[in-house]
Image (cartoon, rainbow, N blue to C red):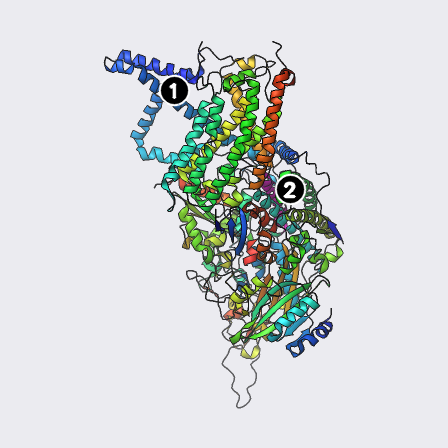
Amino acid sequence: MAPLTLYTVSNDLVSSLLTALGNAIPNPVGAWLKSPDLITGLSVLVFAAILLAASMLNTILLIWWERKLLGRFMDRRGAMHVGYAGLLQNFADGLKLFRKNTFQPREADSLGFYTGPAAYMVTSLILFGILPISSGWNSGALPLTLLLALAIFSFAPLFIFISAWSSNNKYSLMGGMRSAAQMIAYEVPILLAVVAVVIVAGSFDLTTIVYEQQNYWFWGPLVVALIVFVAGMLAEMERIPFDLPEAEAELVEGWNTEYGGMLFAFFMLADYLRALVGSILVVLLFLGGWTLPTWVPAAATSFPLAGIFWFMLKTYLVFGLFVWVRAALPRVRTDQLLRIGWNRMIPLSLLSIFLAALLVTVKCLPFLGCVPSPGS
Amino acid sequence: MQPADLEAALRPKLGDRLLTVEPFARTAGRVRFRRDGALDLFRTMRDDLAYRHLSMVGAIDWVDHREVFYVLWSDERTEYVLLSADVPADDARIETASGVWPSANWHEREAWEMVDVLFDHHPDLRHLLTPDGYAFHPLLRSFKLHEPEELEVKTRHV
Amino acid sequence: MSEMWINMGPQHPMTHGLWNLRVKIDGEMILDVDPEMGYLHRGIEKISEDRHYNEVVTLMDRCCYVAGFAWEHLYILASEGALHIQPPERAEYLRVLCDEFQRIGSHIMWYAAFVQDLGLMSPFLYGMRDRDLVLDLFQSYTGARMTYEYMRVGGVRSDLPPGFTDRARQVLDWLTQRYEEYDQLCLGSTIFRKRCDDLGTLKAADCVAHGVTGPMLRAAGMKRDLRRDRPYAVYPQLDFDVAVADGADVTARYLVRMEELRQSVRILRQVVDWLDRHPGPVMAEQLPRWLGAPYAPVGAEGYLLKRNFPKGVGFSSVEEPHGEAQAYVVNEGGEHPYRVKFRSPVFANISAARQYLVGYHVADIPPIMGSVDVCVGEVDR
Amino acid sequence: MASEPAVPFVEIEALRAQQFVPAAKEALSAMIAERGQEKVVRPVFNWAGRNSLFPLHWGLACCAIEFAAAFGARWDAERFGVVPRSSPRQCDLMIVNGTVTWKVAHKLITLYEQMPEPKWVIAMGNCATGGGPFRTAYSVVPGVDKLVPVDVYIAGCPPRPEAMLDGILRLEDLIRERKE
Amino acid sequence: MSEVEAKPKANENPILFVARPMATAARQFARSLVRPSTIVYPFERLEDPKFRGQVAVAPGKPIGLGEVWDNYRGVHALNIETCISCNLCAFSCPDLCIDMVTVPGGDPKHPKKCPQIDYGKCSYCGFCSDACPEGCLTMTTRYELSVTKRADMVYSPQRLNEVFRTRLPMSPIRLARPANEDSILLDPPLCIGCNACSRDCPTECITMLDIPKPEAKPGEKFPKRIWKEPVINDSDCVRCGTCISVCPKECLFWGTRK
């Protein structure tokens, strides 16, 4: 049986709708409606719309989650008066930013100024699209999902730098350069850490990686890779302690200093989208994706949408870890950041590759896993 | 250090450019000097009497003349000393102390823009607190404050 | 990237007030700096010349808005010197109480702002929360959180309300616990030490040459504290230590301020105990006649000159939370001071900016300037 | 392990949405027909605007400390969605928290002009309102309303953090009734 | 008194790296999970009597001190009935924000004047309430003063009286008048006995006493005057100086009564 994916669902939906319509309407319109080209095209659109809605909703929920969590870390309440417990706060923010008038600084380069945020947003959206969320929600059978995701993930410095440069502001420029340097420096350890996962899982397909973790999650045996990956993700997501590009204290707002209104909302959303994707990647690669350990009672996994529920729970908890780090740690300096990246993270990731290879070779993985082997 | 000791230490170096040394509460004394002896006095205070810390330079407008005063501090003796020199109002200038104590730099800039005392050989005599090109010297007695125009002016006293 | 000047300020998150740090950078390196002040110049010295002696106190609170009591004390000491008045002992103890609580409030405010500059977010909230407790205490006996108008020439406005000392002890206990938390959040983290060690170094000799005082000077190993060296009020009767450190860097300044917070708690415990045991008047009995009724109109200008009130010049210096503040008050016999001149410690500390900023990274500016503890109100006055 | 229901939930939801969308459309068009488009759309945006006011993060004088205290743990202005931003481009609200001097006046105007519309100004404290105790001074602007239009004045010297929050709530009331 | 060397704690363990601050933050998180120290402002107010005992220096509660509002210096409360129109509040104001305006209730010749306060200028220093001899101008715990029009900040005496009627907690601080206060003295040769001081005295502490008309020596001409002289009762006098300001001949002045 072909895997039930989000695309097949939307395809079914669209085709059944159009077929019903086409049968009701006389030819030639009915025949045109039933044509497979139209069905495919429309189902792609529906698929994209669902993805967009889901990713936006999740991002907004993530911002809310961070604000509430950060509030408790700081001994305060966080947003609470807009909607129940402040749930509507970010919708208000988004609507307001949508309403603000758009503008462009006088000396700014308009091409880069507008394409930068748009491209940044689009690449982040694509990222969400290609990641499998549960067995019923993935973008179809792409064999190299992980590579594709990381490749798209590394587009960001380009667009950040474009928008920073074209906004013609010294702070933006410095923020953009820092951002580019930092992201490039941390791409390498992330990729190397991922290689460790790939060695153990034996596949670049994220769905396969998740199913490989049914017996034991990878965070136990690959703890070094996990540390490298989380640190690298913190840098890629530009969160404290690695949020130098938008270091408020010295660079005003970093590379988005000159952006306001909807373009700023793009940056904000894309940032959190990337944070969401980072958390999702951690869950997928190290925490077993949507699967649960086998000793969990079956009732926990048998209700509708259990996979998505557990997956999202894990994702939000991982993001909670990032928030915890943000609440407790100061920011590092540029040179220190780069030094950590090149001098500490790369050796560590090489070590993790070595360990992974060793583990695979001596076949002792099930005993090191945090989850007991199911015995099969 | 008593005012007499101060005078005994300073008189040989400065001669009649040192006017008086009078007692002053909370300090070792107030040294009044003629402005042509400024640089010698500063050097003597710093090098011979170990007043290495210049706390404050201020100026007072006494309408007919202006007074420049310096507050020094010595860590060895843990005490202050005041120096003060009178300069005429129509030729208000005195040698800068910023060559001797770098900390005098900003204080002298402030004294210049506020009370209009010119410090000769000052390395960087720009406006500090008022905007560039501000034409007035607000702490002169002739500079009067007034209520903003739309507010009615009341007499403060009966 | 070639060399360029950037303006950090007047609206910049680093400045904590209105001033402009012009920085010449090459890439991320600082080549030259030029602080530009005066954006908050409010002419306090000039306005003071139009006000009664007691009315100047209202300006002092606003002059340095994080350490209002220290400046009130400074001005009142100078005025009492100029007017030849001696306050009662209980009033002096109350002033020390205010001073030391203010030191705690100011240092905690500094801590909150400083760690926020480092990107550490939650301690800002903790700091503001704990500072609010100190402000609550102030409010209970002065009636305001920040602008107290409490000290008067010849004493203080009112005595403490009932139950104050118990509340004060409660707050002191709470603060002592919180200091440990502050230390853990900063010193406990390796990132903090990496950021702040050997940063913004200003050696003792440079400090003295550029007039730098206060925690910055003590962090360079100089043991100068006016509370011990030129004691005022009742500090000679209190037992405390002067905090020094020898790193001369940002960490050393942090350490000195944290130690001062602990010493202030120590002083305050003694003061609170003394206040419990010794009730008494808080205002001098024999005031000059027009100060005795400071609220009544005293006639046309020049009336007091007719009465031949002794002239005088008052000079005072106070160990303010930021450093060594001085006031110079000239009394020409009128009911207004003839000239008031203040020396702000931050004024001198900022004027030495070139000495401790050049050669570091742009990212180092916020922690270094944070460790200076800038309060623009008292710089510009 | 993966035990998904027989009919994908997504599909069920999509079918439900099919029924929901026309109904919602109908209701909305009925509302618009009844009350005019302005009356439906504007309250939504006004709701959004008043619930997410981003003030400019800058401190002028004493009131800035109380401004900061309002964002501290005890009052937590973020409860109302008020988040200070450092860049004027991302702000809708300028809280002038302190004495404005003539030296900084043109910078204040620049910052105000850099804020995108719609934008509001709160004069916090007496110095911003009318110069306060310093209004006689030679260097002080007697009230920020000489420079930029002010929507809400908050009296106090300095106003308590609660008073600042009260001013923000008053501004929210203003925005609620805003007709542009 | 000695120096204490401030040094970092010796147990700096690099292996702990970032563990200690993370643990501290987590501890704070656990503490504030139940009850953060936030006061939900429009719904809870610190000056609320219910917070008097409840707000405390302890985790798990909104952290603060409750019993601190007795002396708060907020909006003034004016008791118009007891106001004697002495002007002392206006005189003592360092910011010149108090105007004395006429309120109904006085007799037409000498209208009753009460303070009108412009809160856009007031610096809440409390000098006026300290100066008020009758205790009718006090400061309350009201502090919310946001307005949309600048003119709304001016509180007329009637409005201040409304604040008084709300019976908010008011500052009980009353300053004792110093022992050696100046008195108002008379320069007898200048006085013409015009009764202006006695008429305008808000406390009615000035009585006009008859003085004997001296025998005129030949050639001497007396000024044309009423043969009365004001006698000021110092214990009732509030030193407002109204008499000095209304005296047409400037014969009253401040001084020490022998």
Residue A252, given in percent of the width and then of the height, sits at 49, 44
User: Which quadrant: the C terminus of chain A?
Assistant: top right
Residue C331, given in percent of the width and then of the height, sits at 61, 69
* Protein chain holding label 1: D
* Protein chain holding label 2: C
Residue at image location 42% in from the left, 39% down from the top = A163
Residue furthest to the bottom:
E218
Would you say A97 lies left or right of E167 here?
A: left
Which disc, if any, is residue C193?
2
Residue E86 visible in the snapshot: no
Would you say B23 lies left or right of A163 here?
A: right
Any magenta on residue C140? yes
Tally the marks.
2
Location of mark 1 (residue): D17
Q: Nearer the viewer, residue A272 or E244?
A: A272
Span of residues in magenta: C122-141
**Is circle 1 on the same chain as circle 2?**
no
Give me the C-alpha separation between circle 1 and circle 2: 56 Å
- Label 1: state its secondary structure: helix
